[in-house]
Amino acid sequence: MKQVDCLSRYPIMLVTHDEITSRIVNCQQSDEYISSIKQLLENNQINDFVLKNNVLYKIVNDSVFLVVPEALQNEIIRKVHTNGHFALAKTEQVLEQEFYIPNARTKIENVIANCVECILYNKKHGKGEGFLNPIPKDNVPLNIYHIDFVGPLPSTNKRYQHIFTVVDAFTKFTWFYPVKSPSAQEAIDKLKLQQTIFGNPSRIITDRGSSFTANEFETYCSEEGIQHLKITTGIPRGNGQIERMHRILIPVLSKLSHDDPTKWFKHVSTVQRIINSSTSRSTKYTPFELMMGTRMKNKEDIKVNEVLHEEYLNHLMHERDEMRNDAKKNILKVQEENRRNYDKKRKKSTPVQGWRLRCDSANTVWDWPQAATKILRTLRSD
C-alpha cells in the first residue's frame, strides 16, 4: 500500500488560461464601460485613465494598470486565484499588481466562495484556550528565525520527502528547502547555507521536535552564538508564523502538482517567489521590499522606468530605514489588534500550585488530573 502523505490528501482539478492580455485588448473594444471612459478621455473630462495604442489603462499612484472588461473579469480573477489558491487579501494584492477591475474585492470574494479546490481543502479551525501574548519584534531583518519541517510529501527522484522552512520574523521573508528527512543534520546544513549569505540570526524559534532537541542541533546553536527558543509542546501557535506558512504551502503545492504529485519540488521556488513578493498583512510591505529595500522584479510586472529607478536607488538607504521603522509600527499595531480580538473570547486562566490539572487528550503526558507543583511560564505567540 502506498504511503499516505501531505499531498495525496489533495486530489483536485486545475484550469489554466492563456493569452489573457491579448484577449483583454480585444474585449475592450466592445465593452460599454470602457467605451464611455474613452469618450470622457477624448473630451478631457477625466485624468485618471490613459490610452496607449487605443488600449485603456488606469492610473494609480503614477503606475498604470490594464483595465479589464466586464466579460473577462471573473476569468482574470479566477486565473490569478488558481495560480496559488491564496485567500482574499493576497489574491487581491496579486491582481492589483497588473490589472484594474472596479469593485474587485466583491468579485474576488464571489470567485473564491465558488472555488471547488478551496472548498474541498481549506481546513476549518476551532477555538482554543488561553490569551495571546505576542513575541516582541526587532526592527531589523535576519535577527530572529522561525524554523520547522513539513511533510512527508511524495518521494521525488532525489528522495526529497520534506521541506525545511525558514521565516524571518521581522520581514516575513521565507525560504523553502526540499530535504530528504526531518533530521537535525538537515536543519544544520540548511542553516549553514543561510549563514554563507546572511550570517547567523540572534535567535531561532522552533517546536520541540526531535530534530531540534537533538544534542547536535543544540551544540550547533551554542557554537554559533544563537539563542535557541523552544515553544511549549502542544501549543503550535507559539511558532505561528511557520504554522501559517505551512497551511498555505501544502494546499498550494498539492494543487499545482496534481498531475504528478512527485513533481511538487518543481513548484517550491515559484511559491516562495510569490509569497516573498506579496504584501504582508502585518507589515503592509512585501517581504522582499523590507529585506532588499526595493521591489521584486517579476516577469508579470509592468516595465520599470529606468530613470525613476535610478532616482529611487539614490534615496534607497534613507527610504529603507524609514520603511523598516514604519513596518515595525504596523507589526505592533496588528499584534495589539490580534491580542484584543483574541482576548474578547477568552477568560483569564492562570493555574496555581495545588490546582489539579490534566493535559489535553491529543497531547497526553499524564492521563489523570495531577496537582500542579510549579508554574513555568505563560503562553506566548507571534
Image (tube, grey):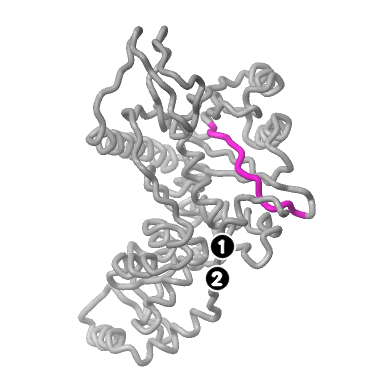
Query: Magenta segment, which residues?
Result: 145-156
Circle 1 crowding by C-alpha within 10 Å: few under 14, some 14–19, many from 20: many
Compared to residue 356, the image places residue 206 above or below, namely below
Q: Are marks 2 and 1 in contact (CB under 8 Å)?
A: yes
Quarter of the image that includes the C terminus? top left
Label 2's element? Answer: loop
User: Sequence order check: which comes first, mark 2 or mark 1?
Assistant: 2
**Residue 132 on image: x %, y %:** 34, 30
Asked whether 213 or 202 is in front, the reply is 213
- As for residue 265 lying within the magenta part, the answer is no
For disc 1, the marked residue is: 255
How many marks can you see?
A: 2
Q: Residue at x 74, y 43 (%)?
A: 180
Question: What residue appears at the point 28 percent right and 70 percent down from the top-left corner?
Answer: 103
Extreme-bottom residue of the structure: 30
Whole-percent x, y for residue 379 in the image:
39, 24
Q: Name the element at disc 1.
A: helix
Query: Looking at the picture, which amino acid does disc 2 mark?
Result: Leu
Q: Name the residue that disc number 2 marks.
A: 14
Q: Is residue 205 left or right of residue 263?
A: left
Residue 215 point in image, percent of width and height: 69, 19
Give me the residue at 44% from left, 85% from top: 25
Q: Position of residue 248 (x, y in %)?
A: 50, 51
Q: Nearer the viewer, residue 206 or 203?
A: 206
Mark 1 belongs to which amino acid?
Answer: Lys
